Image: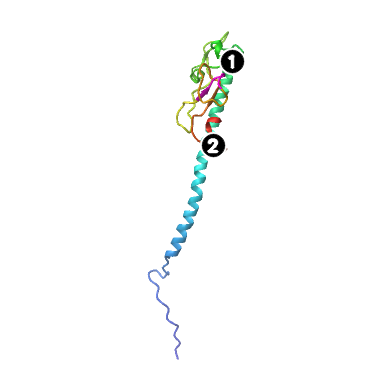
Amino acid sequence: MTIHAPKTPRRRGNGMAQRAFTLMELLITCTVLMILASAVIPMAKNGIKRQKELELRRDLREMRMAIDAYKLAVDQQRIKPPPPENMGYPESLDLLVEGAQANGSLTGKIRFLRRVPVDPFTGHSEWGLRSINDEANSTSWGGGNVFDVYSQARGTGMNNIAYSHW
């Protein structure tokens, strides 16, 4: 008497069972990827905005420090003073780049900025200016001297303060 093993279905090809994704597996995978992508995109946008805000803060600080350095140089009589009505402040941001004529034993010009920075939100190197006679939150420049600078970008920062008030 001979015992035969039950017949098993034959495998195709190299003896391995063929496998494929089912439609359900593909739908689940696509759904998971869409959920992950919807979480990453806002984080990336916030990262870009945060980077621009950091650059704006740095640019404003750099220009304000240059204005203060100019005023200090005038007070210490290291450079030729501007007209008396300017109260020791520069006439424009361009003067900080071009430089002011040195006094005394120093010759040449003393520069306070390498260049006027570009506002990261507007893409231009045009900044709002305030003179010493303007109100602290003024958006129109009274002219004569540059006491402060601010961004002309519209919008609000991540700290809920308008860029023009930074």
* Residue drawn at the location 53% of the way across and 30% of the way down: 164
Quarter of the N terminus within the rendering: bottom left
Q: Nearer the viewer, mark 2 or mark 1?
A: 2
Magenta stretch: give its range: 128-134
**Position in image of residue 69 (x %, y %):** 58, 19
Q: How many angstroms separate mark 2 from mark 1 (CA)?
A: 34 Å
Residue shown at 51%/23% (left/top)? 129
Label drawn at residue 157: 2
Asked which quadrant contains residue 12, the reply is bottom left
Residue 80 visible? The answer is no
Residue 27 vertical placement versus 101 (above, below): below
| Type of colouring | rainbow
Kind of residue at badge 1 = Ala
Q: How many marks?
A: 2
| Residue 132 on the magenta span | yes
Residue 14 placed where, x, y %?
Answer: 39, 69
Dot 2 amino acid type: Gly
Magenta stretch encompasses residue 4:
no
Q: As drawn, which residue projects farthest toward the left?
A: 13
Image quarter of the C terminus: top right
Label 2 or label 1, whichever comes before in sequence order: 1
Q: Which mark is residue 73?
A: 1
Q: Is residue 150 visible to us here? A: yes
